[in-house]
Image: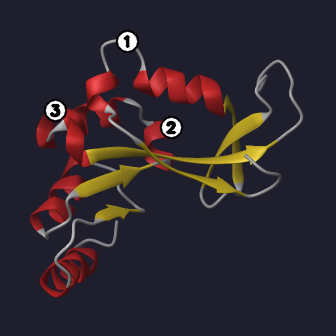
Amino acid sequence: MGGISCSMSCARVAETIFIPFSVGGGIRSLDDMRQVILAGAEKISINSEAIKNPPLIEAGARAFGSQCVVLGMDVKKVAPCAKTPSGYEMVIHGGRIYMGIDALAWAKEAEGPGRRRNLPEFHRCRRHAGRL
């Protein structure tokens, strides 16, 4: 994450606007989450790291409250196949890396039984190709 410069940017945004805002991008740890929350962000959006490290979702929800952790989802339309039966595949790093994970299955897994309160919303779906 951008460390101090990101925290400083968040603090400047929090001083300038008086609406809740979310920060995402480069969030890789609880410490990264803590920095942006302390700087004034209301929510943390995680996407790539959530796919690479799913326990971070629940750890963030336990540490900061489930209302603070938002799961971002970047998907690309692909031909349906055994790995991606919905025809939508999870991608990371701005859509450059295909993960071989069906987007619908990932959404269900991330929200799954007993974890629903930890993931109150899904933040975004980028349309890199096709339409959702």
**Distance Cα–Cα, label 1 vs label 2:** 18 Å
The answer to whether 50 is drawn above or below residue 16 in the figure is: above
Q: Which of marks 3 and 2 is nearer the N terminus?
A: 2
* Residue 107 x/y as whole percent: 53, 29
* Residue 127 sits in quarter: bottom right
Q: Which residue is drawn at 49% across and 38% down?
A: 52
* Badge 3 amino acid: Arg
Render colour scheme: secondary structure
* Badge 2 amino acid: Ile
- How packed mark 3 is, by other alpha carbons closer than 10 Å (few <14, some 14-19, many 20 or more), is few
* Residue 21 x/y as whole percent: 27, 66
Callout 1–callout 2 Cβ contact below 8 Å: no
Q: Residue 62 carries which label?
A: 3
**Distance Cα–Cα, label 3 vs label 2:** 18 Å
Callout 3–callout 2 Cβ contact below 8 Å: no
Q: Which residue is drawn at 42% across and 25% down?
A: 111
Out of 1 and 116, give the one closest to the viewer.
Answer: 116
Relative to residue 33, is residue 104 drawn left or right?
A: right
The answer to whether 47 is drawn above or below residue 101 in the figure is: below
Q: What element carries label 1?
A: loop
Q: Is mark 2 on a helix, strand or loop?
A: helix
Out of 4 and 115, give the one closest to the viewer.
Answer: 115
Q: Residue 113 carries which label?
A: 1
Q: Which quadrant: the N terminus?
A: bottom left
Q: What element carries label 3?
A: helix
Q: Which of labels 3 and 1 is toward the front?
A: 1
* Badge 1 amino acid: Pro
Q: Residue 51 carries which label?
A: 2
- How packed mark 1 is, by other alpha carbons closer than 10 Å (few <14, some 14-19, many 20 or more), is few
List the single residue furthest toward the front: 19
